[in-house]
Amino acid sequence: MVVPMPNPTKDLVLKLMAEKERLESRISEYGNILASNNNVGMQGPLLDADGFPRSDIDVCQVRQARQQIICLQNDHKALMKEIEKNMHKLHAEAAEEQSQSLSHKAAGMHLEDDNELSNTNSEHSVLPTAQVIVKVNMISRGSPAEEAGMQVGDEILEFGTVNSRNFQKDLSQIGDIVRHMQNQRIPLKVQRAGQHLDLILIPKTWGGRGLLGCNIVLPDA
């Protein structure tokens, strides 16, 4: 059994993502308090027309909820910058890891003659080190996935920092990247009809469901 090597950057990103979800949950909780107070929101007046505290809401509760939301939103903004910085670092580390792996393979190749060199190069081009991690079985019209050039039947070799070396056959790995890279560029390596393509996918809200508008499944699904 192959034991995956620890990756401090990935571990940090996962911790930051968990903290992001915790902050968003707390913001939602305080938002529910505002909603339960006659949907006063962040800007609704706390005084009535005569200048007295409104009797239809809990003014003290609303003030506390608003203050907490402001503080949490500031923390959330700073956290998102930290997540973005470490996601870029994770992308760079993955690219460096792939480069080193290819260098080691090239250094270990023993070529006896020109014929063997030709055969080895041909074999390397036909059998790349990357393996399919997921495949696409549905694309919605007008979706971010369609805009990126993705097609039904595409076999994805790399989805951002996820590849065959670190993919654990858990689609939540893909989901985490999509959620936390919203409105940002995610590089994809795609295999289509025997060709390898480089695509750029930008998860974002659109007229349909989700941030991608496509369905991704495991290769053996």
Image (cartoon, helix red, strand yellow):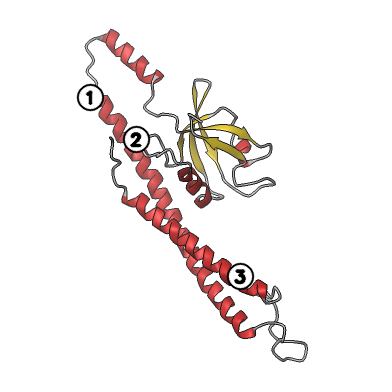
Residue wearing tag 1: 108
Q: Going 51% across and 70% down the picture, which residue do you hit?
A: 72
User: At numbered mark 2, what does the secondary structure look like: helix, strand or loop?
Assistant: helix
Residue wearing tag 2: 98
Q: Let me know if residue 82 appears in the view.
A: no
| Residue projecting furthest to the top | 115
- The amino acid marked with disc number 2 is Gln
- The amino acid marked with disc number 1 is Gly
Mark 2 residue crowding within 10 angstroms, few (<14) / some (14–19) / many (20+): some
- The amino acid marked with disc number 3 is Gly
Which tag, 2 or 1, sits closer to the chain's start?
Answer: 2
How far separated are the C-alphas under marks 3 and 2? 44 Å
Q: Going 42% across and 50% down the picture, which residue do you hit?
A: 87
Mark 1 residue crowding within 10 angstroms, few (<14) / some (14–19) / many (20+): few
Q: Going 38% across and 24% down the picture, which residue do you hit?
A: 128
Q: Are marks 3 and 1 in contact (CB under 8 Å)?
A: no
Q: Going 43% across and 38% down the picture, which residue do you hit?
A: 169
User: At numbered mark 3, what does the secondary structure look like: helix, strand or loop?
Assistant: helix
How far separated are the C-alphas under marks 3 and 1? 60 Å
Q: Is residue 76 left or right of residue 54?
A: left
Q: Which mark is residue 159?
A: none
Mark 3 residue crowding within 10 angstroms, few (<14) / some (14–19) / many (20+): many
Q: Position of residue 122 (x, y in %)?
A: 37, 15
Residue wearing tag 3: 31
Which tag, 3 or 2, sits closer to the chain's start?
Answer: 3
Q: Position of residue 162 (x, y in %)?
A: 42, 40
**Image quadrant where one finds the N terminus:** top left
| Residue projecting furthest to the right | 49
Q: Are marks 2 and 1 in contact (CB under 8 Å)?
A: no
Q: Is residue 121 left or right of residue 186?
A: left
Establish if 209 lies above or below 131: below
